[in-house]
Amino acid sequence: MSCCLLDFGRVQELRQVRDFLFPKHNNAGPEEEKTRAEEEEQQQSAPWLQDCVLSLSPCSDLLVIAREHKATFLSAKWLTDESGQEEMTLAVTWSGTLSAEEGECICSVICIPLASQKRSSTGRPDWTCVVVGFSSGYVRFYTESGVLLLAQLLHEDPVLQLKCRTYEIPRHSGVTEQHEELSILYPAALVTIDGFSLFQSLRACRNQVARAAAAGSDVIQPPPLAYKKWGLQDMDTITDHSSIGITTLSVFDQMKNASMLGGFHTSVKGSPPAMSQYITVGGGPYTGFYYAIEGSSQPLLSHVALAVASKLTSALFSAASGWLGWKSKNEEESVQKQKPKVEPATALPVRFGLPDSRRHGESICLSPCNTMAGVTDDFGRVTLLDVARGIAIRMWKGYRDAQLGWVQVSEARGERDLATSPSMPRRHAQFLVIYAPRRGILEVWGTQHGPRVGAFTVGKHCRLLYAGHRLMGVNSVTSQGWQIHTQQVCLFDPVNGALRAVTIPFHLALSDKKSERAKDMHLLRRVTTLLRSRESEAQSVLLDIKHPAIKKQALESLLSNKNAPVSCLTNVTRALLASLKEQDPEAVDKSLLQFCSSELKLLQLYTDVQLLHTPDTSPTEPEHPSFSGIEEDLARVGPVLQRYTEMNSRPCVSFAQDSSGPLPVRTFLSQLDIYFKDYWCITNVIFVCISGSFLFWGCLSGQSPLQRVCETLQESGISPQQLLSLLLSVWLNKEKDVLKYPDAVSHLGTLLSTLSSMKGAVDESWDGQCVSPWWQQVRTACVQSESSAAALLAALVAHRVAKNAITRLGESKFQEEWECVSLELEQWVVCIKQLEDVLALQTLLCLPSPQGSTGGAVTRCSVKTLLESGRGGVADCVSKLIFRQGVSPDLLRDILQRRGENDICVCVCVVLELLECVCQRFPNSLSPDVLFAHCSWENVVQWNKDPEVGQYLEWSVEFLKMISNPHIQFGVSAMMWQTFIVKRFSAAAFLMEKVGKAPKDRLCRRDVGMGDAAVRSFLGSSVQLLQALMEADSAVEQVSAPDVCVEEVWGGAEGPVSIVELALDQRSVHYPLVQHHCVLASLLHAAMTFSLRLKPLSLFDSKGKNAFFRDLSSIQLLPSGDMDHNLVTVRQEVSHSVLAESEENGVKHSSTEDMWPSVCMELSSILQVNTDILRRHLVCELYNQGLDLRAEEVMMEVQDKDVLGSQLLVLTGQRLAFSLLHSQSQTKPNMELLARLPPTLCTWLKAMDPSELRCPSVPLSQSSRLINKVIEMLPENHGQYSLALHLLEAVDSLHEEP
């Protein structure tokens, strides 16, 4: 491993950036236009990028290119290239002018990513702030989109440099934790801004700008920043600087400095003071070291802060977390027009320096650990400074206009023995990166006195981008658990726009040119290049490597080479193994020897198996005889297998296999790893089927010689357990292909028999009376597989192989014929029975869903999943299928009772056949009550997901009513009410109480979560549910609770408690409370059905209201005794409205509303409404609708005939008045009859209003029958009896007229 320069991104639209920053390139006339090739050559040769100011964010997500008063912001985007790989690109997101004052230009730019404050953050920045320094002295802060956040004039000279220092985790306790800081260099002054206050201010400014943009208001002028300002003295010119941070001198250095500055008798403080160290470069002296004692200078504020200090003191020093009491807009504009006041600087003399009168420093670059710094000068030298001691420790020549950067590399955990020193911190190495543009070379040097460890030839117009900082806003608490990834050094090539990062391995800091390790690493790099062309030389190079770790790495590199032939890899591995065996056994690395031996065996195995898979003309092997009894087993499960194959033969989406060639050798080797000595284990479960297919599929499909492959596998040294795992994985994962080959079962039996006879497969001490781990591995794979058919076939074959082995074992021991009875065979019987049950169940579950149905994808199950799903797992799977198929409750009942086969469609016949087969295998788990309970629960669950489909809830209640056992019915209904119904039910009741009528669709969706039509259906189902609950509660005492049983082979099921078990554990309910809720549900249903104006809760007193929506098992105070007369009156009016609307709807639509009269009669006794009054009202309504026959039936139950007769007398008068006075077909006889009537009757008829009749056109025969009924009901002494007789005469006379 060596240094490398890797591309990690690319900058797009460089031509537009250049044209925007250099407009003169676009002013050429038509006669001056050049060809495209000349333009490209000019772009590559012109060093336009050197005249720009560049800054790249440490997170590489933002690049700023600026010149004079213009700037372009480029943000990161991820694009997919033609090969399908993702590549990071930087595209222009904002371009514009940043200068705000006339004549000012951009002098320096820096991008500072700000850390996210969210707890879920993993180290990525929240946003990036762009800080720009201008020639006017202003420093302005922008967002990534060019929005100005903050601007402040700190000094009236041009800004020379902007640098930032962010938080770094101390590597050991002796390192002082440094604070974050932004430093701004002017020609004779240095301004520092505390990082914490800057971070809070920028966040507050950004939030305030976002709020102002959203509200469309003006941005409030933010408060100024607190800063420190130092006047740098004793240097002629200053060009660059570095802020080292807070340092503390040792006691000796403190005494030495005090003696040199104050003389012999000076006093020394007890503790050394903390000082901030700054290093500047320039001229006179060449390098200056400044020390500012902490607390010697207070933060400065501009005159704006002083003017509002009384209001904003706390806000400014708490980093402006929010804006408080500001001036008006006019006052702010007047303040902005005035030039801000510039605070004077605190004088800071130079402590010492490196005097060199002729040398002039150009730039300084501080190392990440703050211990060294690289300085460039006008003599083309690069000087390495020791920051703590203040001396130059190294100098490089010939680097004119050099650009510097640093790379810090951490030591990997595996490179040192952690067992001997687990508490030792990781070591770090510092590398200095120098870019020499005059020579077009990029070099990497080890520090302090290390060699050049890397050199790359690059372009002469590149820019080396080194930020020197990371995320701002990070501390020791928030950084825990973060993985902050930042680029340290980046090379930007303007020719192709590539961004390249320098990668340096840690070991280069430990080696030099004469190190054996460095030589081995060089040989390692040559191995791969030589392997393609010269195998013998690659072999010799590999043998020349000394270190075992590097030798192993070289061999791994060779084995992972996709272009290396198998023969070459075998020869190289064999030669390396031979050389290791020739050495002293004590000096040889055991792990390397074992690795070579195992890899050589794998290569040999790969070669042999590949040759056996190659078609040839060799004579075919004789077929092996089939196992005894396997034909009977296949004939028994044949029908189910055939049906399962048909169900799984439907077209489905699958991924095409790569058939371009055999399995590559590197893929085969990468999937195997050393386990114990000569045994291997699969390292990746995803590739198990790939390796197994390479080894076994040719044998299973009959395309490879079975016996020879088995012999090859026996000689490979792979453990039989691992080969068995590979074989089973292929068989179970290629179920569709297995079912296509009829001979695959016999081939599988041969392979299992061969593998079980291998050494180490079956324990020699196994006697058949205990469970064998070998066969238990087969059973475990079968019960865990979701390929039901393949698992059953594998179990049948393995059962026969194991039975034959036990038989041979018994014959060898007892030498006589006897029947094998062992624990192993019992385990196989149970396993096969379970797999047969699962196959029948899976066949049912594979039924295709009707188009447009809901309920999810096809459920895949295995023996393991059923055992882990508890006693209700089978019923749960079947109920989901029944819902997905859309089988109605009545149809399911017919299927279970075998009724109506001739009337059922073909699809349902298939369901019937498969469901019958499954029910026969699961007689207890799929008993009718259990299945109905699960179907009811599944439908209500699906309704809860989509309440708009009221049919789901209706079917759920229907399934509930079909449960014959009252204990189960009671428990399921109670759980449904408490889990799904009561919350929406109470919401509907409160909503209707609030609006005082049936709510509209919008209100229903807002409060109840469904439309008005769905609410109507929901309330009707709620009534049915509560009635079923009351009926079940009444019948619970008469029937004993059932036992929840499962089949014998499924007795070990453990998991969630089934629905039936939960239902049987439900507590008893308070019957009057359930009835109380049922009355409310009926009222709500009536109000929604007939759109009544009704406040349902107001029909009950305070006790009744408080009892609603409580737990049904609790004892509540319910209304008792006589109810208030006004309340009874309101209830009676509601009942009359329901009866009237029900009869009207029944005439208009259908007879489905006939239930409402009976409902009203049932509720009348509970609501304390006189039932006879309701019946009289119902009789009148029926006559009003013209339903005379139905009215006569109800009339027989009326008690108070006198009142009813008076009411019907009025109705008869209305009918006669309509016939005589208001009919459109008035005849002369009718008018003569009207004239002959008694004056009293005539006046009474004229007073009648026939418009109140809903059906006025009634035959006279019905009216005559009605008046006869009235005369029968009225006593002779009744005041209206004579009027009734006159009416009878009038009706008869009218009826007699032709």
Image (tube, helix red, strand yellow):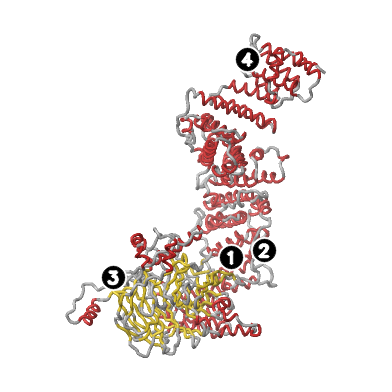
Dot 3 lies on which element? loop
Q: Is residue 1016 left or right of residue 333?
A: right
Query: Which image quarter: residue 571?
Result: bottom right
Tag 1 or tag 4, which sits nearer the N-term? Answer: 1
User: What residue would you read off at disc 4?
Assistant: 1202
Q: Position of residue 498 (x, y in %)?
A: 54, 77
Q: How many numbered badges does the structure rendering display?
A: 4
Tag 2 or tag 4, which sits nearer the N-term? Answer: 2
User: What residue would you read off at disc 3?
Assistant: 295
- Alpha-carbon span between mark 4 and mark 2: 103 Å
Q: Is the residue 1090 above or below the residue 187 in the image?
A: above
What's the residue type where badge 1 is placed? Answer: Gly
> Label 3 crowding class (10 Å Cα cut-off): few <14, some 14-19, many 20+?
few
User: What residue would you read off at disc 2?
Assistant: 623
- Alpha-carbon span between mark 1 and mark 2: 23 Å
User: Disc 3 vs disc 1: which is toward the camera?
Assistant: 3
Q: Is the residue 1287 above or below the residue 473 in the image?
A: above
Which residue is at a point 49% across and 37% down the rendered structure image?
1066
User: Disc 4 vs disc 1: which is toward the camera?
Assistant: 4
User: What residue would you read off at disc 1?
Assistant: 692
Q: Is the residue 619 above or below the residue 33 in the image?
A: above
